[in-house]
Image (spheres, helix red, strand yellow):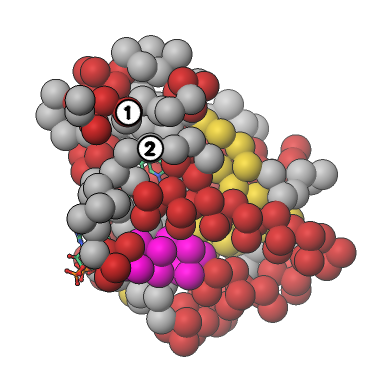
Amino acid sequence: MSVFKDGLLKGRTAFITGGGSGIGAGIARRFAAQGARVALLGRTPEKLEAVAQELRAAGAEASCHPADVRQYGAVDAALCDAAKIHGGIDILVNSAAGNFLAPAASLSANGFRAVVDIDLCGTFNACRAAFAHLTATRGCVVSITATQATVPMPLQCHAGAAKAGIEKLTRDLALEWGRLGVRVNSVAPGPIEGTEGMTRLAPGDTRSHLDRRVPLGRYGRIDEVADAVLYLVSPAAAYITGASLTIDGGAALLGAGPFLDLMGE
Ligand code: HXC
Ligand code: NAP
C-alpha cells in the first residue's frame, strides 16, 4: 500500500532502465499502481516480459525494450519506440547498474570501466536520448545512485566513482535543463533487502552484521525506495531539482559506512 493518493501518475508515461528486476521493477509496480504507463529497458527480454505481464494483468499499459544502456543508438531507439507506443515520455528513471565486490588493488581496468560504463555512461545515454521527449512534456528524471557516491566504502571504488559521477551529472543537467521545465534528481539507497545488489554485496553472514550498523536497525524495502522516487516525480516535488535524496535508514551517518568490516583486519 502506498501513502500517496491514488492516480497520482494517471496519463503519464515512465521509461525505466533496469526495470526488469529489483528496485527498478519495484518502481515500475509503484508507478503502474498510480496510473502510469511504463516502458521497461534491460538486457534480458524474459525479465522485462515477466514484469510487463504482471503489470498488464493488473490493468496497466506496459512495454518492453531489450537493450544495453552502453549502446547509445539502442537506447535512443528504445525511447523513440516507447514514445510512439505510449504517446510521449514524461518520466525517465535510471536504475540499470552493475556491481560486485572487488579490492581496488586487484580490480582490472576493464572491471572498473564496465561498471562506470553501465552506471554513469548508461545514465548519460538515457538522459541524452530522453532530452527531446522530456522537453516536449516538461518531464523529469530520477537516477538511482547509492550512498557509496559520497561515503567511502571498501571494495566499491568502481561503483562509488560511477554513482558520484551520476550525482554530479544530475546537478549539471538540472542546471542546464531547468529553464526548459525538466527536473533532474537522484535517490541514493542504502542496503535494500531482497535485491540482487545486497545478494552480491552482503552475502551470508555479513547481513546480520550490517543490520546492526544501520541506525534504524534494519535494511530498507524496495517499496520504500519506490515511494521516494514517486515523491520526486510527483507535483509535491515541483520545486525540487538537482537534489539527491538519501534513503538508507541513516547508514551513511556512520561515516566510513556499514561495509567497513568487509575489509577485514
Ligand atoms: C572482479 C569482476 C567481477 C568480480 C566481473 N568483473 N565481475 N572483477 N570481481 N566479481 C570484471 C571482469 O573480469 C571483466 O574484466 C569486467 O569486469 C567485465 O566483465 P564482463 O562479465 O565481461 O562484463 P559485463 O557482461 O558487461 O557485466 C557487467 C557486470 C555484471 C557488472 C560485471 O556483473 C552485470 O552485468 N551485473 C548486472 C546486475 C548487477 O550487478 N546488479 C547489482 C546492481 S546493485 P576483465 O579484465 O577480466 O576483462 C548495486 C548495489 C549497490 O549497484 C549497493 C549499495 C549498498
Ligand atoms: P538488479 O535487480 O540487478 O537491477 C539492475 C538492473 O539493471 C537489472 O534488471 C539488469 O538487467 C539491468 N542492467 C544491468 N546492466 C545493464 C545494461 N548494461 N544495460 C541495461 N540494463 C542493465 O539490482 P538492484 O539491487 O535492484 O539495483 C537497482 C539499482 O539500485 C541500481 O542502480 C543499484 O546500483 C541501486 N542500488 C541498489 C541497492 C541495493 O541495496 N540493492 C543499494 C543502493 C543502490 P539485465 O542484467 O537483464 O540487463
Whether residue 95 appears in this view of the structure is yes
Query: Toward the viewer: 137 or 140?
Result: 140
- Asked if marks 2 and 1 touch (Cβ < 8 Å), the reply is yes
Query: Toward the viewer: 242 or 34?
Result: 242
Q: Is residue 131 left or right of residue 150?
A: right
The amino acid type, in three-letter code, at marker 1 is: Leu
Whether residue 223 appears in this view of the structure is no
Q: Is residue 10 left or right of residue 28?
A: right
Q: Where is residue 53 in the image (x, y as percent from the top left)?
A: 31, 58
The amino acid type, in three-letter code, at marker 2 is: Met
Check disc 1 and report the residue beneath it: 260
Check disc 2 and report the residue beneath it: 153
The label shown at residue 196 is none
Query: Toward the viewer: 235 or 182?
Result: 182
Q: Position of residue 264 (x, y in %)?
A: 20, 28
Q: Where is residue 13 in the image (x, y as percent from the top left)?
A: 59, 62
Q: What stretch is highlighted in magenta?
A: 113-123
Ligand 1 image-quadrant field? bottom left
**In magenta segment, residue 210:** no
Question: At numbered mark 2, what does the secondary structure look like: helix, strand or loop?
Answer: loop
> Going 59% across and 48% down the picture, which residue do you hit?
186
